[in-house]
Image (spheres, helix red, strand yellow):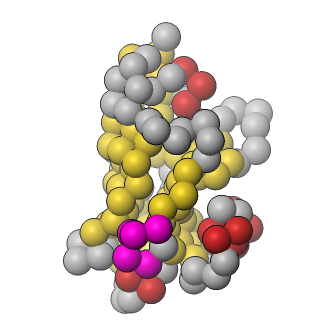
């Protein structure tokens, strides 16, 4: 599976962006999909994830109520809608895919098998 993330950019505080992650290869619907981010000087952190059909979604506390993850299995694409952006959301955002295991596993970057190249999100104050 190859993943291509897009949609990042520069936005003012309070603004919105939608990230997309297009997957190539077969059986996209068999993978849990996650979004992670990494700010300069910080470790990569979990942002959001969705299991196979998109019915189960998970969010980091820092983005809950502001971000929304969704997937379109017909288009092999997962999205991250980001609203009410804050300067602390500034980071490189990565999408990733894994064979879904436990809920704990899909929250953990170490569980993910495939990674996209990352897209920069910068939120100005």
Q: Main secondary structure of the magenta part?
A: loop
Q: Is 113 rendered above or below residue 30?
A: above
Relative height, residue 14 to residue 111 (above, below): above
The answer to whether residue 113 is seen in the rendering is: yes
Q: Please state if 37 lies on the left or on the right of 72 as rendered.
A: right
Q: Residue at position x 43%, y 78% from top?
A: 52
Image-based side of 75 in relation to 57, left or right: left
Q: Which of 42 and 80 is in front in this view?
A: 80
Return the x and y of residue 48 as percentages of the image width and height.
53, 54
Q: Which residue lies at the image location 49% right of the left edge and 11% below the top edge?
A: 125
Q: Does the magenta stretch include residue 55?
A: yes
Total label count?
0
Q: Is residue 22 visible?
A: no
The magenta segment? 52-56
Dividing the picture into quadrants, the one containing residue 10 is: top left
In the image, is residue 30 part of the stretch drawn in magenta?
no
Vertical position of residue 26 compared to residue 73: above or below: below
Q: Which of 94 and 57 is in front in this view?
A: 57
Q: Where is residue 36 in the image (x, y as percent from the top left)?
A: 59, 52
């Amino acid at each position: 599976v190859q993943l291509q993330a897009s949609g990042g950019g520069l936005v003012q505080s309070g603004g919105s962006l939608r990230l997309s992650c297009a997957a190539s290869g077969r059986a996209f619907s068999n993978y849990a999909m996650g979004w992670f981010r990494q700010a300069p000087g910080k470790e990569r952190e979990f942002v959001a994830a969705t299991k196979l059909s998109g019915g189960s979604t998970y969010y980091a506390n820092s983005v809950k109520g502001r971000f929304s993850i969704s997937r379109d299995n017909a288009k092999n694409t997962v999205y991250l809608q980001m609203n009410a952006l804050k300067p602390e959301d500034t980071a490189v955002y990565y999408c990733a895919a894994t064979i879904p295991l436990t809920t704990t596993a899909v929250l953990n970057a170490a569980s993910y098998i495939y990674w996209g190249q990352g897209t920069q999100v910068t939120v100005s104050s």
